[in-house]
Image (spheres, grey):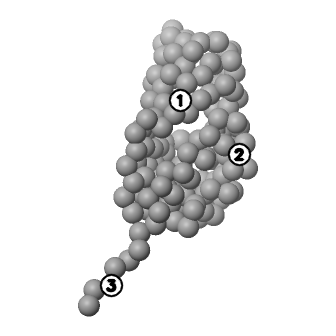
């Protein structure tokens, strides 16, 4: 007799990932991190890497920083795949650089690609890998040109 393990709701992982994007990064509400991230979350994204309280502080800082630079940011998930407790998502972030970013606000339109992977257990992110197109942000805001001079 085989015993099968019940898989989590396939949409739960995507819904949690969308919450942190829509209710956190898009609004600047860093308190969402306490709701959607496990206290021992492991963050792998460059610049945010860490675990537990360190990772939570880094994620909250990132939410504040992104929102300060681009307060009108809109996140769109364009494609996703969920397997078990893990979701892979491809999306975009679009907005206007009305806040400072490696210099004064440029007012430039921003359109970057995002690749996200999150493991979600009991409705909370326990591990995350993110790959926003930071080079595109540097180029689109004019920061790349300022840094290369």
Q: Which numbered disc flags the more N-terminal residue, 2 or 3?
A: 3
Q: Position of residue 127 (x, y in %)?
A: 49, 57
Q: Which numbered disc flags the more N-terminal residue, 1 or 3?
A: 3
Q: Are marks 2 and 3 in contact (CB under 8 Å)?
A: no
Between marks 2 and 3, how big is the CA–CA gap? 41 Å
Q: Position of residue 145 (x, y in %)?
A: 50, 11
**Residue drawn where x is 51% and y is 16% of the image:** 140
Residue 107 visible in the displayed image: yes
Residue 44 visible in the displayed image: no
Query: In the rendered image of this protein, does residue 5 appear above or below residue 35?
Result: below
Q: Position of residue 78 (x, y in %)?
A: 43, 35
Query: In the rendered image of this protein, does residue 96 appear above or below residue 81?
Result: above
Between marks 1 and 3, how big is the CA–CA gap? 42 Å
**Residue drawn where x is 66% and y is 52% of the image:** 33
The secondary structure type at the circle numbered 1 is: strand
* Mark 2 vs mark 3: in front: 3
Categorize mark 2 by other alpha carbons within 10 Å: few (<14), some (14-19), many (20+): many
**Residue 123 appears left or right of 131:** right
* Label 1 sits on residue: 93
* Mark 1 vs mark 2: in front: 1
* Front residue of this view, candidates 124 and 45: 124
* Label 3 sits on residue: 3
**Residue drawn where x is 37% and y is 49% of the image:** 81
Q: Which numbered disc flags the more N-terminal residue, 1 or 2?
A: 2
Residue 41 - label: none
Categorize mark 1 by other alpha carbons within 10 Å: few (<14), some (14-19), many (20+): many
**Residue 99 appears left or right of 136:** right
Is the N terminus in the top left, top right, bottom left or bottom right quadrant? bottom left
**Residue drawn where x is 59% and y is 41% of the image:** 21
The secondary structure type at the circle numbered 3 is: loop
């Amino acid at each position: 007799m085989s015993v099968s393990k019940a898989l989590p709701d396939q949409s739960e992982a995507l819904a949690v990932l969308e919450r942190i994007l829509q209710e956190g990064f898009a609004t600047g509400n860093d308190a969402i991190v306490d709701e959607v991230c496990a206290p021992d979350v492991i963050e792998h994204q460059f610049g945010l890497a860490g675990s537990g309280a360190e990772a939570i502080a880094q994620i909250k800082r990132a939410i504040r920083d992104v929102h300060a630079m681009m307060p009108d940011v809109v996140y769109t998930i364009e494609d996703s795949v969920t397997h078990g407790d893990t979701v892979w998502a491809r999306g975009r972030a679009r907005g206007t650089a009305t806040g400072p970013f490696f210099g004064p606000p440029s007012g430039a339109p921003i359109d970057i690609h995002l690749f996200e992977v999150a493991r979600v257990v009991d409705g909370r992110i326990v591990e995350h890998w993110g790959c926003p197109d930071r080079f595109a942000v540097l180029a689109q805001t004019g920061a790349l040109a300022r840094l290369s001079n």
